[in-house]
Image: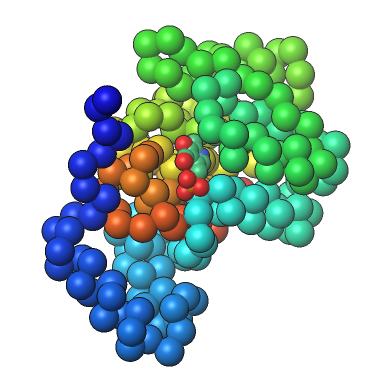
Amino acid sequence: MIPLMKNAFLNEFETKKALAEFILKAERLSMGTECLKFERKFAAFQGCKEAVLFNSGGSANLAMLQALKNLGRLKETDRVGFSALTWSTNTMPIIQMGLIPVAVDCEVSTLNVMSRQLEERLAQTAMKGLFITNALGFAGNLDKVREICKERDIVLVEDNCESLGTTLPSGRTGNFGLAASFSFFIAPTSVFPCAAASFTMAQASTNPG
Ligand SMILES: Cc1ncc(COP(=O)(O)O)c(C=O)c1O
C-alpha cells in the first residue's frame, strides 16, 4: 500500500524536540503568546489585517458563518452558494447555521467554480452568500467572481483550506472575500506540522463590502 505521506513533520527530529520542550515548559498549551505570535505572522504572510487561530479548518468554517450571522450579513433561510467540489466541513456549517445550501457547478478544466457557472446558477436562483472552495491548490477566476458578488450584494467568503499559498495574477487566494479559512492539516497542505486553521476577517485591501 502507498502511504498518504512519509513524514508528518518538516525537519522531523528538530520539530518534535521543539514541540516536546514547548509542552513541558509552557504554562498554557493553546491560545497563549505563541498563538498570538503565529496569528500575527500568518496575517503578515497572507497580506491581510487579522488572523485567528482555530483547532481546524472545519471549526474555522463554522466560526466564519456564525460571525456572518452575528454581524447580520446572513440570516436563517438565506441561500448560500457552495462549490460542487468541496469538503464536508464546507457544506455542513451552512446547514448547521440554518442557511440553505445551493450547489454551484465546477469547470472540469480547473476543478473550480468559475464566473460562468456562478452566473448560470444565479440565473436560476438568488444567493445572499457564496462560500467558495479553492479546490486542490487551484482556484477559479476569483477576480470576476468577486465582481459578480459585489454587483449583486452577495457576501463572498473563501474556503482556502486546500490552497494555502496559491497565487493568481489578481492576488493570493484567501484575499478575495470578506474572510477565508486555511488548514494546516497534513492531508490538504502537506506543509505544516499540526492540524490547525485560521481565518481572516476584514481584509485590508480586498474587502468587497
Ligand atoms: C475544502 C476543505 N475545507 C475544509 C477542510 C477542513 O480542514 P481541517 O482538516 O483542518 O478541519 C478541508 C480538509 O481537510 C478541505 O479540504
Residue positioned 35% across, 79% down in the render: 23
User: Which residue is farthest front?
Assistant: 1
Q: Locate residue 140: give its quadrant.
A: top left
Residue 18: horizontal and vertical position, in percent? 22, 74
Q: Is residue 146 toward the left or the right of residue 120 in the image?
A: left
Residue 205 seen in this snapshot: no
Position of 128 relative to 194 (above/below): above
Residue under the image location 64 percent in, 34 percent down: 91
- Locate residue 97, reporting x and y percent: 77, 45
- The percent position of residue 98, horizontal first and vertical second, equals 82, 41
Which residue is found at the position 46% from the left and 22% from the top?
112
Quadrant where the N terminus is found in the figure: top left
The residue closer to the viewer here, 76 or 197, is 197
Q: Is residue 59 above or below residue 43?
A: above
Of residues 87 and 76, which is closer to you in this image? 87
| Rendered location of residue 126, percent (x, y) | 76, 24
Camera-nearest residue between 157 and 25? 25
- Rendering colour mode: rainbow
**Relative height, residue 203 to residue 156 (above, below):** below
The front one of 185 and 171 is 185
Q: Which residue is depicted at the point 64% across and 50% down?
A: 62
Query: Residue 117, relative to residue 134: is it above or below?
Result: above
140 displayed left or right of 5? right
Query: Does residue 79 show up?
Result: yes
Q: Is residue 146 left or right of residue 141?
A: right
